[in-house]
Amino acid sequence: MAFDLLQSHVRDLGGFSVRRLLPAARHTMVGPFIFFDHFGPTELAAGEGMSVRPHPHIGLATVTYLFEGSGLHRDSLGSVQVILPGDVNWMVAGRGIVHSERTPEADLRRARVLHGLQIWVALPREQEGCAPSFSHHAAPTLPECELAGVTLRVILGTAFGASSPVPISSPSFYVHARVPAGASLIIPSDYPERAIYPIDANVLVDGEPVLRHQMAVLEAGVPVQLEAVQTASVVLLGGNSLESARLLNWNFVASERSLIERARSSWASYPNEQFGQIPGETEWIPLPA
């Protein structure tokens, strides 16, 4: 078998459940990807929505991608951005940023479905202390191509001959593939670390079953064949490994424990200069024990 299979674990984020794939015991990262949460599809009644209060990050970039629904991003840089299906929000935390994630007020007035992915990319050591930044990339700006009947949207990096406009921090790729029933796709070995995650249907990888919500971490240097028994939405991601291992503590990622401890101490005495405040927001998530 040319892959290692990871099972998802359901986590409750305060009334909002997600399936978490990374970090895992056997694979703390895949390329620079250090965190992988799949939320939904969740049916929300009118008046119900997502409400993640302001919280901090260091040493990583967050990638938000929706299949259904909408979200409102606010951060301590003053960014205010609605995200819709197919868009990408790319937030580089660097030395420190605060953001909140909520349902837009207009969408609270109706029933709807929320479904998407929240993924973190660990920054290379030389970028851990960089200034924070935020960029939004609307769905039409992301390249799509078709290969053997499979539609491929390149969310991050370069893959299958197409390149995303998102300003990534290290060699990597992140692709949303829509695979019709009976279609197949060769996943090349362009990157040393790669993974396949079926969103909504079981698939075959080199003839072996990978169930929806499982992640297949592929063997390095070996092309594999992805095949859909029924029409499937699949995520492909990976890249080069970073120059050293990373520590993950709550919302903080760092190459050295001292950076984690500084961030924890700083957030315990929030608000302060390291993280700044989100204009118009007065609450925040306290530092966990």
Image (cartoon, rainbow, N blue to C red):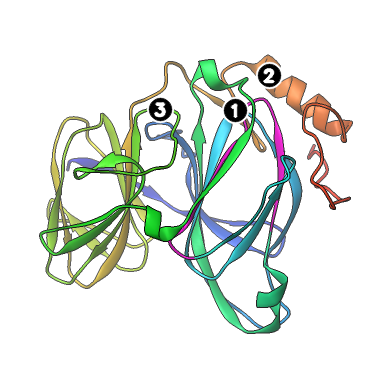
Name the residue nearer the viewer: 261 or 121. 121
Nearer the observer, disc 3 or disc 2?
3
Q: Which quadrant holds residue 233?
A: bottom left
Q: Which quadrant holds residue 188?
A: top left
Reading the image, the residue beneath label 2 is 259
Q: Can residue 178 be seen in this view?
A: yes
Reading the image, the residue beneath label 3 is 170
Rendered residue at 34%/62% (across/down): 212
Q: What residue type is labelled 1?
A: Gly
Which comes sooner in the sequence, label 2 or label 1?
A: 1
Q: Which quadrant holds the N terminus?
A: top left
Residue 153 horizontal side relative to residue 261, left or right: left
- Residue 245 vs 234, above or below: the answer is above
Find the magenta span and give its range.
85-101
Q: Does the magenta stretch include residue 87?
A: yes
- Residue 279 vs 199, above or below: the answer is above
Q: What residue type is labelled 2?
A: Leu
Reading the image, the residue beneath label 1 is 59
Rendered residue at 85%/52% (across/down): 280
Rendered residue at 65%/17% (across/down): 257
Tell me where residue 52 appears, x and y as whole percent: 72, 56
Which comes sooner in the sequence, label 3 or label 2?
A: 3
Q: What residue type is labelled 3?
A: Ser
Contact (Cβ within 8 Å) of mark 2 with mark 1 = yes
Q: Pointer 2: residues within 10 angstroms few (<14), some, or many (20+)? A: some
Rendered residue at 69%/23% (across/down): 260
Name the residue nearer the viewer: 235 or 149. 149
Residue 208 horizontal side relative to residue 65, left or right: left
**Disc 2 on helix, strand or loop?**
helix
Tell me where residue 259 appears, x and y as whole percent: 68, 19
Q: Pointer 3: residues within 10 angstroms few (<14), some, or many (20+)? A: some
